[in-house]
Amino acid sequence: MDGFLDLLTLPAVQRSAIGLLIAAVGLPIVGVFIIGLDIIAVRFAMMHVALLGIAVGLLVGVDPMLCGLLACAIAGAGVAPLARRPTGLPGAMGLLMTFAIAAALLVLSVSGVNATGAFELLWGSILATRNVDLIILGALTVVVHVLFWRWRRQLALLLFDRELALCSGVAAGPLLLALLVVVAVAIGASIRLTGALLVDALTILPALGARNLGRSLRSMVLWAIALGVAGNSIGFVVALLLDQPPGPVLVLVAGTLTLLTYLIPEGARDAIDPGHRVDRGGDPVPAGQRLWQH
Amino acid sequence: MTAAAIKFSGVTCRYGRRTAVDGVDLDVAAGEHVALTGANGSGKTTLLRAALGLHPVTSGSITVGGRPAATHGEWARRRRDVAWVPQRLAPGRFPLLVDELLDSGGNPVAARTAATRLDVAGLGGRPLHTLSGGQLQRVFLARALGAVAAGARALFADEPTAALDFHGQEQVAALLAALPVTVVVVSHDRAMSRACDRVAEMAAGKLRLV
């Protein structure tokens, strides 16, 4: 135990712990968006798009990671029009992935840049978290929360059914565009900050568990954050106690928590749902107006 | 509240090379209730969806209250003007609560009052995917009535009684008949057709008055 407490005094471990906590509060919401949009392959797609951006950055001499994030944002915005097609977004992710990796390899080849070096820019580690990474994670978390809490009613309709959202006065196009850009940039940045393996544990796994527990978008988000905080806290402590690399341990713990959610009976979910409350909206019936009698 | 006249002029809609709606002309007077009948695949649903901007119009025009729609702003106005009961009552790929659906019509209080009248009060906290087909249909109808209370001047209902029992069909037909707005209802239900002022039939994308 003394060794564990000693580890907690190390600045690198403290930064990792803070990074995981921030990530646990923000990234599971991104995971809920990803599941709602049915784009689980976005992680692979954005990894390759980021690589393309990095390759271009190395070629033209601009900060590669900035170019990588910019490429993610452009790719996210670029696939938005495909959402109108019934299978548009899931298919688009596969298309993006293939195009981006081919283009990246071509750019790297033409520019004479070492491909391994470019790939290494993508492999982050939570134990190598820097102060600037914490700032980026924090900013991402704020953006994700603002997007969700400001437009949660519209998002609930959009993720349920785009046409219903349109007919309910939701600006579905701009909202979807914002959603895809935020998801793309968040995934691109997270891969750099935490490593590709951990991105799944921080985004998709809590959201998958929340999908089993939540009865509405709001309760799904609350469950996803709760699972994210629990998984990251337990996983990080276990990794330190066992002196094992945190990435795999965090993924295993998050995966176990997600598996457990499949075991909860349908009937028990109502009782444990923290978000079993509905947001009210709209105007009341104007004075003197009544529903039509006959 | 004023009802809106609806005018379909030479409307043609296609799915790829297949013509679903073929040069349809239909004038619906303000406050008139029209039943749209016809075999499956005859273009009824496409015609209503085109009026809401959910399916592109290849040629022709559709006006509601004398207004066409082309820009985003005009479509947004159109969708406020026309309450909609969709045919495809899919449970969606994501959870949505009944109360959230009722709220989306623009007047939650009126939508809940309508839900009570349609015998689906008390379902507010339930996700839509847990409802039966009949309950889902009534909830969507209650939402549309909320939209009418919020200012919509017309209502498009696409087979609003398809999942209801005989009592439910009579009940919904009577409720729609009492609405002081323009109504275009796609239906195979005789009670609904009887409750309308006029019946128009579609066959292979073309329209004829009955």
Image: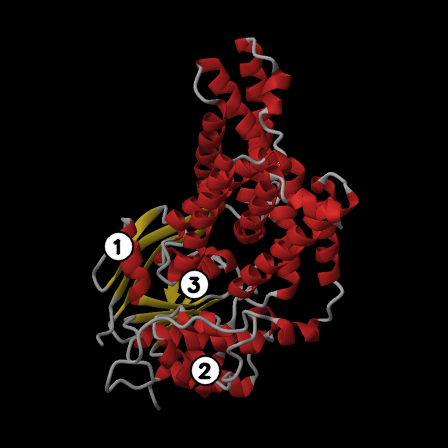
Residue under pointer 2: B115
Between marks 3 and 2 in the image, the one whose residue lies nearer the viewer = 3
Asked which secondary structure carries label 3, the reply is: helix
Question: Does the image show residue B43?
Answer: no
Name which residue lies at 47% across and 29% down.
Answer: A71
Q: Chain of mark 2?
A: B
Q: Label 3 vs label 1: CA separation?
A: 23 Å
Residue under pointer 1: B74
The verdict on a common chain for dots 3 and 2 is no
Question: Could you say which is closer to the camera, residue B178 or residue A226?
Answer: A226
Residue at far bottom of view: A294
Q: Chain of mark 1?
A: B
Between marks 2 and 1 in the image, the one whose residue lies nearer the viewer = 2
Residue under pointer 3: A153
Q: Label 3 vs label 2: CA separation?
A: 20 Å
Under mark 3, the amino acid is Arg
Q: Chain of mark 3?
A: A
- Give residue B175's quadrant in the image: bottom left
The verdict on a common chain for dots 3 and 1 is no
Q: Residues within 10 Å of mark 3 (few under 14, many from 20)?
A: many
